[in-house]
Amino acid sequence: MNKKDQLLKKLDRASELAAKGTELTDEEVTEANALADEIASLKAEVAAADATAKRLSGLARVDVHETTGMGDASGTLGERFVASDAYKAFRDANPNGVSKGTPISISAKGIGFVTRKADPNPLNTSDTGNVLPTRLPGIDDITYRRATTFLDLITRGKASSSSLQYRQLVSITNNAGIVKESKTSTGTDKTGGLKPLSTLTTQTKNVVAYTYADGIEITNQELSDDGALVSLIDGILRQNVDLETERVVLSGAGTDDEPAGILHTTGVLAQAFVTDAITTIRKAKTLLATTSNTTSQAVVLNPEDDEAFDLAQDAEKRYYGAGPFGSGPSTIWGIPRVTSQIVPVGTAIMGDFSQIQLLTLDPMSVLAFNQHKDYAQRNLTYLRAEFRALQLIRQPAKLAVVTIKSA
């Protein structure tokens, strides 16, 4: 029994004695005095233990800018790299650039958690952990409008272990209901006062952390130019790593080399083609609502299929919706349309993507070094960005793969 349990037990006993008021026996008076001392001592010990645990927790996962010397943690990934202590030390040591054959090794680790955090102000356009501004799903930021990407839809968080066993929810039997007051101790249902019990059907899944990375060759002159370096990291490296992350979440093969994506996960619903793409999407919306009580968050389409919806016309050659001069986010049946080149042409994926969790184990790091091939002789440097994360699909039945073209 730990200290807190001991304290609770003694507090319960003290309450029992206090309820007797002045009718305590001599033995109970002695016990009550001893309890008062023991309770005071246990309270002090529990408070000290809580304070120690809090301090240890702060030391175990210190904010990334404290461990890496990021300075100002705001800005894009590229801006945080050039503001890191590692890069500043390199520039200070080589104010006029580097000569041919000079060893280069810059390691700015953990300069960007790959996490999109909800902000209480939906019009906030600053995000200390990402390249793009924060926007809550379903809210159109008119101050800084940008297209919603697939990675905006999923849940991003942090992990502390490289492997994890979790329960994947297969189905729910909802037995919630109004319960009458129990008149006897023999009731067997809600009308007899027995509280209901819903049941969850689950299956165990094991996930491990995978490394998402990309690298490019840059010249030593580009390495010594802050502006060029920022544009390379934000415009190429971050974009490529995000695209690979999107590919794995959507279509990962589920092998030893990569986790299973939506298209290869058992339990995801399937909607066959019915009449035309528009009708089929509506059928899938109903399928999700009736099967798993899901309100669709978005419909993810290949850009070619998204174009087909934009160009759809009625018998009078009039565009559906607002046509080419409309503004605002595109929808179908009231559901936002999001494009991804990873989704196969003729297929749509819809449902609640927020139950997909990408948990970052090692935050995004950017490294630059020339100990690679003959780069030192050629004045070239290898620039690499990478992070490690675990991928979980909590409730497959809240997603549906929809065939929107006939065979």
Image: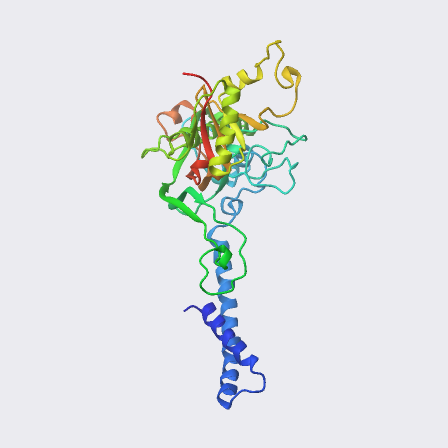
* 385 sits left or right of 373 in the view: right
User: 259 or 212: nearer the eye?
Assistant: 259
User: 376 or 348: nearer the eye?
Assistant: 348
* Quarter of the figure with the C terminus: top left
Where residue 151 appears, as percent x and y from the top left, is 50, 32
Where residue 51 appears, as percent x and y from the top left, is 52, 63
Residue ID at (65%, 30%): 144
Where residue 397 appears, as percent x and y from the top left, is 44, 36
User: 99 or 30: nearer the eye?
Assistant: 30
Can I make out residue 97 in this image? no
Can I make out residue 153 in this image? yes
Where residue 136 appears, as percent x and y from the top left, is 60, 37
* Quarter of the figure with the N terminus: bottom left
Is the residue 262 above or below the residue 405 in the image? below
Classify residue 19 by image quadrant.
bottom right
Residue ID at (50%, 87%): 30
* 344 sits left or right of 66 in the view: left
How many marks overall? Answer: 0
